[in-house]
Structure formats: structure tokens, C-alpha cells
Image: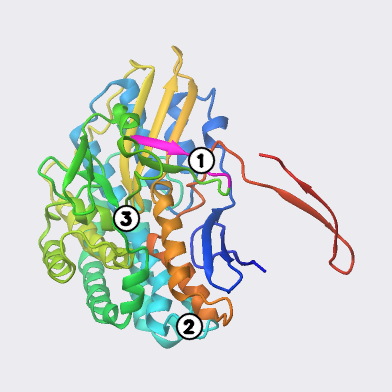
């Protein structure tokens, strides 16, 4: 008889999801799927709102990465206004965006994934968590806490609050950086950089303890997608959107955000509220690609900051230019933390960083606008249409986590087939199935914007737990 294993509530991720593993009659894995069970309806309930409200509204999509939505939404609104924002506004936006990158990557690596690396994939689940980490490795845990604090403090100093700031606005930012806050941020940089370098050294040592996981954690050829700067360096705020093959060789480049739909298609599967974007010229599902820190390092010629470039050289010496295993997202994330801290320092040292010219004001000059930026988890696209009065008529969001949906599903199946034995089920087997999802660090709170439906089954149970009636929604 065929059986199904359900991991109800994937642990140590941001949001809610489940994984189902279908076994054949011999107990071997026949199929596996990653189900995102949340739904977010922001595209619909922003209709009729003034475009000026969009960045603040869109920041509410997620409490983990509100700054990412601020950036993409503000850039889409800049496009609707048809304005070039002041150079210093762009610098300040970059600082906040990088601060979020640092704090989010720290949360992913230290709080969500490192318990697997420190205690082992088969370790006691009662200890294999952030509390066990604090108890047994307090200095390591403190580094993660302080790196997250570094990023959150910068967001708070710039935006007035750490969660859901409304500081970036159409045309720039609402307030300049003060000298006091600049000096305060600069004083935190040496400590943050030391903690990030320690974490990177640790991961380089521990990586070799997991050869089977490196080999099986979503390890297959895909395209890579992400922003690059004009000189092909690591980029998170602006630049062109580059598409490469599995070897990192460029396949297509998008310089005008409003043309994204010519290269990115969007599919909806019945088993999930999470959309499945794909590279349109290859079709669905063959146009699978990956985004996020690993993809960005594959696409970039370099980071552009000394310590991050040094770590990137080690990364490439050991793994090559385009490593296929998604286990290496962890290492890429740490390199980006170093880059983020270094780049924040560089931006703070710009002679015009205290300029008070931080906003361009205009009325709407276009009826359609698109903003693209890099969230910690990958490429984020906000696409808006307004009427002649500047009121929202339509919105479409392609979320970073959604871009990885096809790869995550294929990774779950690959790991399940490698490690899960339905005849001799062990907790560590299922933990590995969850751990491959944690490599991608999905943020499901902000990613579920599909327009399709998930199958819905309502069961009426007796007091003894027996099913006496059921209602199945037909799709």
C-alpha cells in the first residue's frame, strides 16, 4: 500500500509550510512536495490606495524583511513619478537595504541553520535549536545576536523604528542622516566585522563534516538570476538583472525593469499558494532558476570590497565559479554579511552622506511602474499600475522566495530520495528534508501571492477520531 509522510509545520523557517513525501509499496520515496499554506492578498487590498502610500503599506507584508519591500515599492513609485532620486537618497537607501541584509542573513545562519551544523543533522531535537545553542555555545550565539542587532539598530536610526519603517518614499527618503547617527553607526562597524569573520572561519571548518548533505541538498544544474552592477560586481539595490546558465555564463540581461515579463513567467501549482516563476524563453518548468546569495556570487565578477573579495576567492578556490549544491547558500550568506558591513562603512565615508537633499517631488507621470531590488533571499519585483489620479489599479509581486520555488521542490525530492527510508523512518532523515529548505531561507510570510487555489479538504470526525464525512473543494 502506498503511504504518505507529512511534515506538518516545517521548523526553523520564517512562515508556515508543510512537506509531503509519497512512498511506494516498497517504502521508497516516489515523490515529495513543498506546500506553502499561507496566503497574502496585498495585491488586491492596495487597489484604490494612493501610490504615495504604497511603500509604507508594502513594508507590512513581512516583519522579517520589510526593508526589501520598502525598496522595491519605492523604486516602482519612482518609476511612476518618472523622477531620478537625489544621489544621497540612493546612498541612504543602500545603507538601510544592506543593514537588513546583514540582520536577516545573521538570523538565517545563526538562529535557524547553525543548530544543524553544530549538533548534527541527527542530533537530539530537544537540543538542536537556538536554546541549545545558547546553552552550549554562548559565544557563537552571541555573535549571531549582535550581528542581527547591528543591522536592526541601523534600520532604527535611519527609519525611526526597526520594524516596518516608512522612511523610504516615492522620490527618495523622508529625512537625511544626521551626523550623530552617522558616527554611531560607524562606531559599531569594527565589532560587527570581527563577528562576521569569526562565523565565516567556523563555517569553512564545519562544511567538510557534511559531505553527504553537500552532495544531496538541492544539488543540480539550474540557471542563476540576480542584479549586478554596471561593472558586474555584487549588487543589491540597483543595476541590471542578469540571467546565467548553470556554469555562470550570461544568457540574458534586463536593463529596463518594465520588460521583466519578457524573461520571467509565472506559474501556479494546485498544491501551494506560492507562485513558481520561471525563465520564459525555456518554458515551464524547464526554465528553473535560483536566486539569493549563492546566485549573486555566481553572477558577480567580484564583491568590490577587500574582505568580502578575499572570502570569495577562498569560496571559488574550493567550489569553483558556479557550485550547484544549495548547501553553499550558508557560506554565500556569510560572505554577503561581510560585504554588507564593508559597504555600509564605505557609504558612510562618502563626503555628501549628510546632504539634506534626499527627495525629488513630482506628480505621477506614468501609469505603470516597476521596481526591482535584491532582498536577502533574492530578486524582488514590484509592478504597479495607477489611474490618472495616482490611485492604484493593479499590482503584481514576484517575491524572492517564490523565485526559488521550483528549486526548493526539486531539492525536497532529491533529499527525500537520498535519505528517507519509509521502512526504517528516523527523525534525522526528516530533519534533512527540512534542512534543505532552510538552505534557501524562505520567507513565506511575504512570498505567498498566488492567484490560484490550493486543494481544500474538510473532514468531520467522530469523538473517536474516525472520519464520518468529508467535503472536498474541486479545483
Q: Position of residue 417 (x, y in %)?
A: 46, 69
Residue 426 falls left or right of residue 412: right
User: In what element is the residue under mark 3?
Assistant: helix
Which of the pair 399/101 is nearer the observer?
399
Q: Earlier in the sequence, mark 3 or mark 2?
A: 3
Residue identifier under label 3: 101
197 to 446, vertically: above or below: below
Q: How many marks?
A: 3
- Tell me what residue is drawn at x 35 percent, y 30 percent: 261
| Residue 168 can be seen, yes or no | no
Q: Quick one: label 2, few (<14), some, or many (20+) residues within 10 Å?
A: some
Which quadrant holds residue 258?
top left
Mark 1 or mark 2: which comes first in sequence?
Answer: 2
Q: Quarter-wise, where is residue 133 in the image?
A: bottom left
Quadrant holding the N terminus: bottom right
Identify the residue at the far bottom of this view: 136
Q: Is residue 265 magenta?
A: yes
**Residue 24 appears in view:** yes
> Decide: marks 3, 1 in contact (CB < 8 A)?
no
User: Residue at image x 51%, y 84%?
Assistant: 127
Residue linked to disc 2: 132
Query: Which label was assigned to residue 268?
Result: 1
In this rendering, the label closer to the viewer, 3 or 1: 1
Q: What label does residue 179 carry, if any?
A: none
Residue 314 drawn at (x, y percent): 14, 70
Which region shows up in magenta? 264-270
Q: Residue at x 34, y 61 (%)?
A: 105
Amino acid at each position: 500500500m502506498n503511504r504518505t509522510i507529512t511534515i506538518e509545520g516545517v521548523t526553523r523557517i520564517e512562515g508556515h509550510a508543510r512537506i509531503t513525501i509519497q512512498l511506494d509499496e516498497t517504502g521508497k520515496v516516489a515523490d515529495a512536495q513543498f506546500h506553502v499554506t499561507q496566503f497574502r492578498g496585498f495585491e488586491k487590498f492596495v487597489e484604490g490606495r494612493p501610490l504615495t502610500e504604497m511603500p509604507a503599506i508594502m513594508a507590512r507584508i513581512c516583519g522579517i524583511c520589510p526593508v526589501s519591500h520598502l525598496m522595491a515599492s519605492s523604486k516602482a513609485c519612482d518609476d511612476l513619478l518618472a523622477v531620478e532620486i537625489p544621489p544621497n537618497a540612493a546612498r541612504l537607501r543602500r545603507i538601510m537595504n544592506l543593514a537588513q541584509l546583514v540582520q536577516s542573513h545573521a538570523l538565517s545562519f545563526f538562529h535557524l541553520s547553525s543548530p544543524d551544523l553544530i549538533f548534527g543533522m541527527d542530533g537530539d531535537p530537544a537540543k538542536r535549536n537556538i536554546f541549545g545553542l545558547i546553552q552550549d555555545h554562548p559565544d557563537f550565539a552571541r555573535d549571531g545576536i549582535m550581528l542581527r542587532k547591528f543591522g536592526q539598530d541601523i534600520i532604527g536610526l535611519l527609519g525611526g523604528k526597526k520594524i516596518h519603517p516608512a522612511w523610504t518614499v516615492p522620490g527618495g527618503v523622508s529625512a537625511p542622516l544626521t551626523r550623530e547617527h552617522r558616527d554611531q553607526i560607524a562606531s559599531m562597524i569594527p565589532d560587527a566585522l570581527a563577528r562576521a569573520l569569526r562565523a565565516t572561519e567556523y563555517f569553512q571548518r564545519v562544511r567538510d563534516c557534511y559531505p553527504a548533505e553537500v552532495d544531496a541538498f538541492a544539488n543540480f544544474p539550474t540557471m542563476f538570476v540576480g542584479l549586478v552592477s554596471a561593472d558586474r560586481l555584487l549588487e543589491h539595490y540597483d543595476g541590471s538583472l542578469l540571467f546565467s546558465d548553470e556554469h555562470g555564463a550570461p544568457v540574458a540581461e534586463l536593463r529596463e525593469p518594465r520588460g521583466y515579463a519578457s524573461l520571467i513567467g509565472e506559474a501556479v501549482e494546485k498544491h501551494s499558494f506560492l507562485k513558481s516563476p520561471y525563465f520564459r524563453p525555456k518554458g515551464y518548468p524547464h526554465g528553473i532558476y535560483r536566486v539569493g546569495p549563492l546566485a549573486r556570487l555566481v553572477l558577480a565578477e567580484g564583491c568590490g570590497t577587500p574582505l568580502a573579495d578575499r572570502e570569495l576567492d577562498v569560496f571559488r578556490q574550493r567550489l569553483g565559479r558556479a557550485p550547484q549544491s544549495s548547501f553553499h547558500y550558508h557560506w554565500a550568506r556569510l560572505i554577503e554579511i561581510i560585504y554588507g558591513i564593508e559597504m555600509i562603512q564605505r557609504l558612510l565615508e562618502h563626503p555628501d552622506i549628510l546632504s539634506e537633499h534626499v527627495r525629488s517631488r513630482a506628480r505621477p507621470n506614468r501609469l505603470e511602474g516597476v521596481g526591482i531590488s535584491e532582498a536577502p533571499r533574492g530578486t524582488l519585483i514590484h509592478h504597479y499600475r495607477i489611474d490618472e489620479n495616482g490611485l492604484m489599479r493593479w499590482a503584481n509581486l514576484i517575491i524572492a522566495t517564490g523565485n526559488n520555488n521550483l528549486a526548493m521542490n526539486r531539492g525536497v525530492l532529491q533529499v527525500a530520495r537520498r535519505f528517507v527510508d519509509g521502512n526504517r523512518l528516523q527523525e534525522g532523515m526528516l530533519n534533512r528534508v527540512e534542512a534543505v529548505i532552510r538552505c534557501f531561507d524562505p520567507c513565506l510570510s511575504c512570498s505567498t501571492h498566488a492567484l490560484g487555489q490550493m486543494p481544500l479538504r474538510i473532514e468531520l470526525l467522530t469523538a473517536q477520531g474516525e472520519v464520518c464525512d468529508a467535503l472536498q473543494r474541486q479545483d
